[in-house]
Image (cartoon, grey):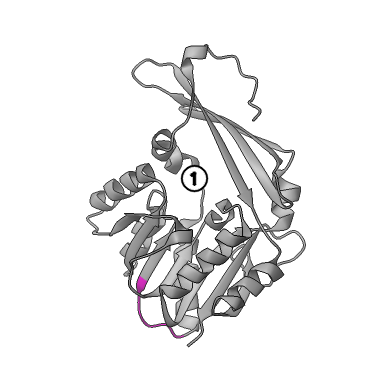
């Protein structure tokens, strides 16, 4: 995979592990509208008459949303594939005085949990699944862990965003402690993208910047394909919205929001 051409001493360039990435993730994601997600989920639960607040936050990452949902009165369980992300999430929950059960599992292989009133996969996390089989298997596992009538809420990148916003574009950030160069390339599959990132993070002990490299792959599918998979795995599609709006997606919507209900 290609890397950005940046002049740094070789001994200060290393591949970023999730341990490194986990501890700067919240800085990089500071602009994510977490509070809008909480409001969005609350509104859908009210709208569709779901009274319970037992919630599974799949791909919970550093627990930013898990904490906010818990503070809003939800009984939250968090699941993520990265032990380092979960370590940050545990510390965050402790700092807020919250007891949030956190578990390391692949969302496509979810096992051993009870039933929930609502399950969420937020912040385009579903797009990290690279095969159709993984997406279908994840939907099936979610269905197995939802109470009849419970809601499954998730978002994905639109095809427009993958092909028109990401692919062949470069994004940069340069602030006092963290900078990055983010290049986006076509992925192996149609409607997929490879994110090639180089981070420069200030080491406060030395005053120098460490370089870390990250490589991410994401893939999305047409709304109609997601809808067909959802219906095949036991869901009733209630709403398909875009970008926190009540309106259906349009040609330049960037994030597609699904609100679906497990059939009784």
* Residue 158, image quadrant: bottom right
Q: Sort mark 1 into few (<14), some (14-19) or many (20+) by Cα contacts within 10 Å.
A: few
Residue 151 in the figure: left or right of residue 164: left
Residue 118 in the figure: left or right of residue 245: left
Q: Nearer the viewer, residue 27 or 148?
A: 148
Secondary-structure class at tag 1: loop
239 in relation to 254, above or below: below
Q: Is residue 231 magenta?
A: no
Main secondary-structure element of the magenta-colored stretch:
loop
230 in relation to 198, above or below: below
Which span is picked out in magenta? Answer: 49-54
Which residue is located at x 40 percent, y 53 percent? 80
At which x and y percent is residue 84? 36, 42
Which residue is located at x 51 percent, y 48 percent? 31
Residue 133 in the figure: left or right of residue 150: right
250 in relation to 264, above or below: above
| Residue 176 makes an appearance in the image | yes
At which x and y percent is residue 43? 48, 75
Residue of label 1? 29
**Number of residue marks:** 1
Which residue is located at x 45 percent, y 27 percent? 177
| Residue 43 makes an appearance in the image | no
**Quadrant where the N terminus is found in the figure:** top right
Which residue is located at x 63 percent, y 60 percent? 132
At which x and y percent is residue 260? 55, 76
Q: Nearer the viewer, residue 29 or 164?
A: 164
At which x and y percent is residue 93? 28, 53
Residue 137 in the figure: left or right of residue 84: right
């Amino acid at each position: 995979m290609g890397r950005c051409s940046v002049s740094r001493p070789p001994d200060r360039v290393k591949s970023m592990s999730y341990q490194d990435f986990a501890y700067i993730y919240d800085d990089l994601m500071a602009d994510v509208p977490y509070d809008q997600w909480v409001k969005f989920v609350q509104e859908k639960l009210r709208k569709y008459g779901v009274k319970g607040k037992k919630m599974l936050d799949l791909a919970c990452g550093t627990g930013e949303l898990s904490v906010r949902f818990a503070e809003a009165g939800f009984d939250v369980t968090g699941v993520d594939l990265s032990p380092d992300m979960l370590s940050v999430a545990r510390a965050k929950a402790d700092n807020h005085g919250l007891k949030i059960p956190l578990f390391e599992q692949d969302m496509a292989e979810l096992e051993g949990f009870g039933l929930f009133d609502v399950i969420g996969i937020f912040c385009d996390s579903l797009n990290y699944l690279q095969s159709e089989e993984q997406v279908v298997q994840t939907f099936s596992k979610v269905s197995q862990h939802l109470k009849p009538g419970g809601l499954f809420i998730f978002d994905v990148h639109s095809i427009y965003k993958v092909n028109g916003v990401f692919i062949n574009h470069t994004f940069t950030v340069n602030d006092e402690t963290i900078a990055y160069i983010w290049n986006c390339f076509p992925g192996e599959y149609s409607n997929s993208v490879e994110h090639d990132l180089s981070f420069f993070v200030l080491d406060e002990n030395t005053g120098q910047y460490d370089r870390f490299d990250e490589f991410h792959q994401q893939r999305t599918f047409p709304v109609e394909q997601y809808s067909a998979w959802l219906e095949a795995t036991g869901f009733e599609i209630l709403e398909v919205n875009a970008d926190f709006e009540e309106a259906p997606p349009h040609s330049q919507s960037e994030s597609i929001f699904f609100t679906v209900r497990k059939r009784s």
